[in-house]
Amino acid sequence: MNNQNFRKPRQIFSLLTLSLLLCGISIAQSTNVKGVINGRTGATMTVQSQDGGNVTVVLTPSTTVEEPQGLFREKHLAMTALIPGLVVDVKGSYNAQNQLVADDVKFSGNSLKTAEDIQAGLAPTKEQVEQNQMKAQAEQKELHQEQMEQAQHQQELLAEQKKIAANKAAIAAANKRFGELGDYNILGEVTVLFGNGQVTIEPQYKPELLKLAQQAMGITGYVILVKGYASKVGSAALNQKLSTERAQNVANFLEQQGKIPLTNMLAPGAMGTSQQVAPDTTAEGQAENRRVLVRILQNKGIAGT
């Protein structure tokens, strides 16, 4: 046999071996962390993992945020959706500071809705609780069927149920702390008022918002909290929609005109007619209740207080 012809298979085999080794190295560098967001500080967030430990996650402009929409579809969202209390699955790699640099963050729509409701202070109605219970029961029945079909995975499923219970407890604790702002100092605040049925920011408030944005960018590890409210004039559904659009418009202005990065903003909270600051029986009181509250927050751990 010709020596040159003999060497070709050996060269091909060597290249295949090298390719497999490189693939193995790449896979080893990537990792997944599942848990609950229990803090946001600047462009980083803290995730309490399923084993109980905290992992610092770094968000970058290339980080993708996705909500699965079925087996093969995913909905891409902004990083403002990453709020405390959200159950997430983070994929990325660790840097030299032992921080997980996120390539991809995924979460379910149900988890986002729960976290948003807790942040906004909206208590679920009795009907919603019953629907959630029925849905949970249906999911439990489906899980039980899978357990019957896959008896060999019984121990793994029991362990997973324990993790779910731990996650629920962590969600409740994290959202209670954040909802009371117990872990944060308020370093700046602006209130924007709106006309009846209006969602557009009036010109006199724009300089105040820009000044707040400039102040925030001089603070280490700041986050911006935006909450929209409405008076009780009109239906509850309409007022919820108005509070949502008001908060979103202010958040968009801070991002586009104030140059606040999305990594430093929490998702705008739609408070509806909750937490009224004045009686809705007068025109003056209604005007005070049609508002958006913007706050600069800093974690007390950073401030040393």
Image (cartoon, rainbow, N blue to C red):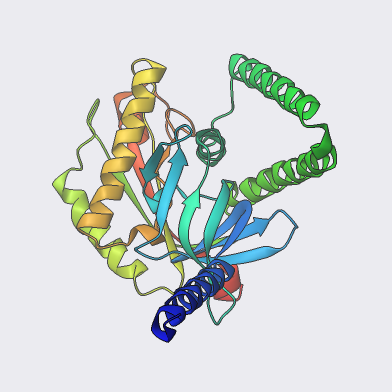
Please state the horizontal and vertical placement of residue 40, each as a whole percent of the image: 52, 60
Task: Give the camera-side residue of 292 and 112.
Answer: 112
Query: Is residue 182 something one can see in this rendering?
Result: no
Please state the horizontal and vertical placement of residue 38, each as a whole percent of the image: 61, 55
Please state the horizontal and vertical placement of residue 43, each as a whole percent of the image: 44, 66
Instruction: Determine the image quadrant of residue 5.
Output: bottom left
Compared with 95, 84 (above or below) is above
| The C terminus, quarter of image | bottom right
Single out the residue that lies furthest toward the right.
Answer: 155
Single out the residue that lies furthest toward the bottom.
Answer: 3
Single out the residue that lies furthest toward the left.
Answer: 203
Q: Residue drawn at (36%, 75%), measured in percent from left and top?
A: 218
Please state the horizontal and vertical placement of residue 235, each as a whole percent of the image: 37, 15
Single out the residue that lies furthest toward the front.
Answer: 1
Instruction: Determine the image quadrant of residue 194.
Output: top left
Q: Residue drawn at (50%, 73%), measured in percent from left and top?
A: 13
Query: Is residue 261 something one can see in this rendering?
Result: yes
Looking at the rendered structure, the number of numbered marks drawn on it comes to: 0
Q: As drawn, is 214 to the left or to the right of 143?
A: left
Task: Give the camera-side residue of 208 and 130.
Answer: 130
Q: Residue drawn at (43%, 85%), measured in percent from left and top?
A: 3
